[in-house]
Amino acid sequence: MPVPYKVEVIVKSVTKGKCPQGFKAGDRWLIEDGKTPGGMCAGAYDSVAPAIRLFRLGGEHPWDRDKDVTHVSCPDPEHWVIYEVRRLR
């Protein structure tokens, strides 16, 4: 059974320091057909992967006002990068 949703991951902001990978606000990756996004660092991908999986399979977080959007932070405490994970309907 094909997964019905594509998911986009967008760098929403870099609020502390500079991302060591060079990511900046507006960078984006499209996740579709079960393929991981090229160029995303492992730490960032590990952080957003649960939200990607949830959205691709039709789930939602009870705390998100918009059921198609959630925000996830990079695990690097020295560089605050916030990712927006968006389900595309």
Image (cartoon, rainbow, N blue to C red):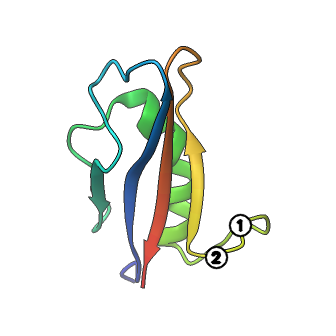
Measured along the vertical axis of the image, is residue 38 above or below residue 20?
below
Q: Is residue 1 left or right of residue 61?
A: left
Q: Is residue 59 left or right of residue 28?
A: right
Judge by depth and name the residue closer to the eye, 20 or 55.
20
Residue under the image location 35 percent in, 44 percent down: 25
User: Local crowd at mark 2 within 10 Å, few (<14), some, or many (≥20)?
Assistant: some
Can you tell which quarter of the image residue 44 is in? top left
Measured along the vertical axis of the image, is residue 73 above or below residue 20?
below
Q: From the image, tell me which residue sits under label 2.
A: 67
Quarter of the C terminus within the rendering: bottom left
Mark 1 is on which residue type? Asp
Mark 2 is on which residue type? Lys
Q: Position of residue 79 (x, y in %)?
A: 49, 20
Residue under the image location 38 percent in, 53 percent down: 10
User: Local crowd at mark 1 within 10 Å, few (<14), some, or many (≥20)?
Assistant: few
Q: Which mark is residue 50?
A: none
Q: From the image, tell me which residue sits under label 1.
A: 64
